[in-house]
Image: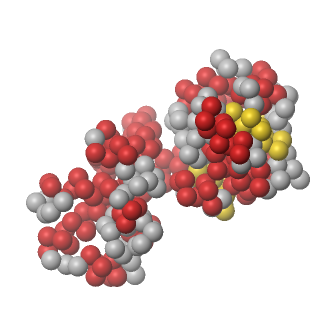
Amino acid sequence: MSSTVAFIGLGHMGAPMAANLVKAGHRVLGFDLVPDLLAASAAAGVEPATSAADAAAEADVVITMLPAGRHVLGLYHEQGLLAAARPGTLFVDCSTIDVADARTAHEAVVAAGHRALDAPVSGGVVGAEAATLTFMVGGGAEEFAVAESLLAAMGKKAVHCGAAGAGQAAKICNNMILAVSMIGVSEAFVLAESLGLDRQALYDVASTASGQCWALTVNCPVPGPVPSSPANHDYRPGFAAPLMAKDLGLAANALRAGGVDAPLGYKAAELYAAFAEGEGADLDFSAILRTLRPQNGTPA
């Protein structure tokens, strides 16, 4: 069954997600503050709207993909998205934002007479383009059931994680695992270099032994072993380091708020914040390996 979807935020992730909804037979009304992005999505079959509120006014479902919680809340309130939507509209926020902001947004949507889900994604731009994203969803079971067909058009898996905010909680926990894993894998390759161990030999062992993980076998941080990894393409993202730094900042906020002692999580946040502000600003998060080599006296 086709739906009319308002898609707000047509950047690197939002544009291919909206295009995949069009391919699945849905009518998609799109809006972005950047005219060039709106025009590019129009070429993919997304109908340009004059404002976010205008798009929402015609939609059964409103999907947002925005940089931060303040943008989502501002869109809902100051830009009148909640007021413009018809009663009972389903709002699905696919942005990665603070858990507290996600819960505040959910409450605002429900108070305005609508339905809400938080549904951040994993899979990056490649996953958005290929419709292989994983959605981590927080909210009611009935709302999740309504959204499932739309999520299936944009991804390969959608997991209902629990009540409001649970999707965001799953996302930041997952990415904290990923960041810590990538740092560990990178340190292992640096150690291997210092010991004269060939990187391919280390990969061949670890990829089929207890060191196996996504950071090694899919996004390997050194050139050679995994041809499709960003390391073989000048570390072009992929999953950009600043986005990882942002997610780890959200995780650190949640750790502090919950009084959780997580030394590796805090250290990963610190390392990625510094990397994203410096040489990693335009690189994949796996390029964190570059910052480890000089510190350990091995060649860059």
> Could you tell me residue 152's position as x and y percent?
73, 58
| Residue at 44% across, 44% down | 243
Q: Which of 164/79 is in front?
A: 79
- Seen at 53% across and 54% down, the residue is 124
Q: Position of residue 269 (x, y in %)?
A: 34, 44
Residue 292 in the image: above or below residue 258: below
Q: Position of residue 202 (x, y in %)?
A: 28, 78
Considering every residue shown, the one lying at the far top of the view is 78
On the question of residue 210 being in view, the answer is: no
Q: Is residue 124 left or right of residue 147?
A: left
Q: Is residue 154 shown above or below 89?
A: below
Q: Quadrant of the C terminus?
A: bottom left
Compare residues 217 and 35 and report the one nearer the observer: 35
Q: Is residue 186 visible?
A: yes
Q: Residue furthest left?
A: 297
**In the displayed structure image, the side of residue 65 where residue 52 appears, left or right:** right
